[in-house]
Image (cartoon, helix red, strand yellow):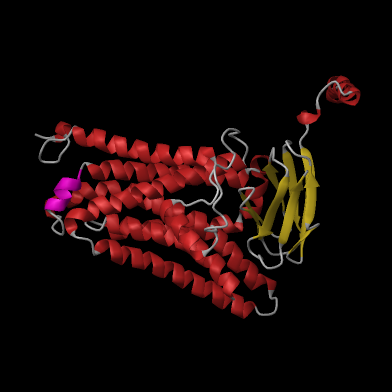
């Protein structure tokens, strides 16, 4: 029972923390709940479809079908998150000013959340399909003690979701003038984590041959499949033995988003609006 | 017609391979693994160092399994009854553990690189 709880917890944790952080980072944007719920719903539906077609997917692209899909999903989530981080940096100031009082800007701000919905959707899809297959496998096997395994899976699911809720509550308790800086920092680290996982998939599919050697190995000090390791993996992209390519992608993604945000901000008037848009 | 053409193209190649004129790196080393009753068979596979390896995993159970290895940095889902290919290497000599993530208590194995 503990084993199945741990497996489902690991899969749920990553998606739940992602949603919790994104929900906190967008909490003052009009219609954000609708966008996030739509993303989660689409991701769950996609998980069922993906789990059902996993056999066909596995044989595609000369056996690299899963890697192709993983790479696409990660690249998509990364692009959407980057776009959102850069976009939100142009609005940070006005959002702090009118926190909890969105009013006239509601329409305008609502437009950008499709990126968040897509990022949430593909994240749920990635972790969801695996969970569906695992739980489906337990249910179908009818081996002795499957009820306990299924109960364990339920415990893992709820614990994972609880962690997502916890980070959301923690982030939303931060003072309003810091909340954007803090939640944006978390979004940046999530982007780095996605980039590092993308690098891993590119190596796994043998599309990129360089930088595949591990730089260091901390798997004895902090195993990646221990609960703290899982938590750090989901939050900041912790990898016990990262390759050069992973570290490079991680730093490049964070550096790019940070510089692009600064560059966009530099083009703003003191009112915190893009110069091009001011009357 | 096509068959003749194919033979014409392949035969000189086959001769070259036989003569050892073309180094063996052209073909990856292939390894076979079977998953049965949530266990890997064999539990230990051996392969030479500094070569690209293709591990063919045939999941003979009806339930899905996920081949996972932290040291090899690989994870791939293998649906029940399906086959999957995992590419690894070139690797340094050593022992690389792998396991089935969906049945980690029973599905364990090691790739030994010599």
Asked if one can make out residue A2 in the rendered structure from this viewpoint, the answer is yes
Question: Which image quarter: residue A33?
Answer: bottom left
- Examine the structure image and report whether residue B95 is included in the region drawn in magenta: no
Q: Nearer the viewer, residue A213 or B75?
A: A213
Left or right: B84 as drawn, with respect to A171: right
Q: Quadrant of the N terminus of chain A?
A: bottom right
Give the percent coordinates (x, y) of residue A109. Answer: 22, 48
Magenta segment range?
A91-97
Give the percent coordinates (x, y) of residue A191. Answer: 40, 46
Rendered residue at 55%/78% (across/down): A151
- Examine the structure image and report whether residue A92 is included in the region drawn in magenta: yes
Give the percent coordinates (x, y) of residue B49. Answer: 75, 39
Give the percent coordinates (x, y) of residue A34. Answer: 31, 59
Left or right: A53 as drawn, with respect to A269: right
Q: Quadrant of the C terminus of chain A?
A: top left
Asked if one can make out residue A41 in the rendered structure from this viewpoint, the answer is no
Rendered residue at 79%/51% (across/down): B45
Q: Nearer the viewer, residue A104 or A74?
A: A74
Q: Magenta region's main secondary structure?
A: helix
Question: Which image quarter: residue B9?
Answer: top right
Tell which residue pokes out farthest to the front in this image.
Answer: A221
Rendered residue at 71%/63% (across/down): B107
């Amino acid at each position: 029972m503990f084993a199945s709880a741990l497996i489902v917890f690991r899969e749920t944790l990553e998606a739940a923390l992602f949603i919790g952080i994104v929900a906190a980072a967008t909490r003052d944007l009009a219609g954000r709940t609708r966008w996030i719920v739509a993303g989660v719903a689409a991701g769950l539906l996609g998980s069922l479809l993906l789990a059902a077609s996993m056999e066909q997917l596995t044989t595609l692209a000369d056996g690299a079908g899963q890697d192709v899909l993983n790479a696409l999903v990660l690249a998509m989530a990364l692009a959407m998150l980057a776009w959102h981080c850069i976009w939100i940096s142009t609005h940070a100031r006005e959002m702090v000013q009118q926190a909890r009082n969105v009013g006239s800007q509601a329409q305008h701000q609502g437009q950008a959340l499709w990126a968040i919905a897509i990022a949430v959707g593909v994240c749920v899809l990635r972790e969801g399909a695996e969970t569906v297959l695992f739980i489906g496998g337990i249910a179908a096997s009818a081996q002795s003690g499957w009820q306990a395994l299924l109960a364990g899976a339920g415990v893992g699911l709820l614990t994972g979701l609880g962690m997502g809720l916890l980070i959301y509550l923690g982030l939303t308790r931060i003072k309003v003038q810091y909340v954007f800086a803090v939640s944006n920092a978390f979004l940046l680290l999530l982007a780095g984590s996605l980039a590092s996982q993308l690098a891993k998939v590119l190596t796994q599919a043998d599309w990129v041959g360089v930088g595949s050697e591990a730089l260091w190995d901390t798997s004895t000090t902090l195993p990646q499949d221990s609960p703290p390791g899982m938590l750090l993996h989901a939050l900041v992209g912790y990898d016990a033995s990262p390759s050069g390519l992973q570290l490079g992608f991680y730093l490049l993604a964070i550096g790019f988003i940070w510089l692009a945000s600064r560059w966009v901000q530099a083009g703003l008037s003191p009112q915190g609006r893009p110069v091009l848009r001011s009357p | 017609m096509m068959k003749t053409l194919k033979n014409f193209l392949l035969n000189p190649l086959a001769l070259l391979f036989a003569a050892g004129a073309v180094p063996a790196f052209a073909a990856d080393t292939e390894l076979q693994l079977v998953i049965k009753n949530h266990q890997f068979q064999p539990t230990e596979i051996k392969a030479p160092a500094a070569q690209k390896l293709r591990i063919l995993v045939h999941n003979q159970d009806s339930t899905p399994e996920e081949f996972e290895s932290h040291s090899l940095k690989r994870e791939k889902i293998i649906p029940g009854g399906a086959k999957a290919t995992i590419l690894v290497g070139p690797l340094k000599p050593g022992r690389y553990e792998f396991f089935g993530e969906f049945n980690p208590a029973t599905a364990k194995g090691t790739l030994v690189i010599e």
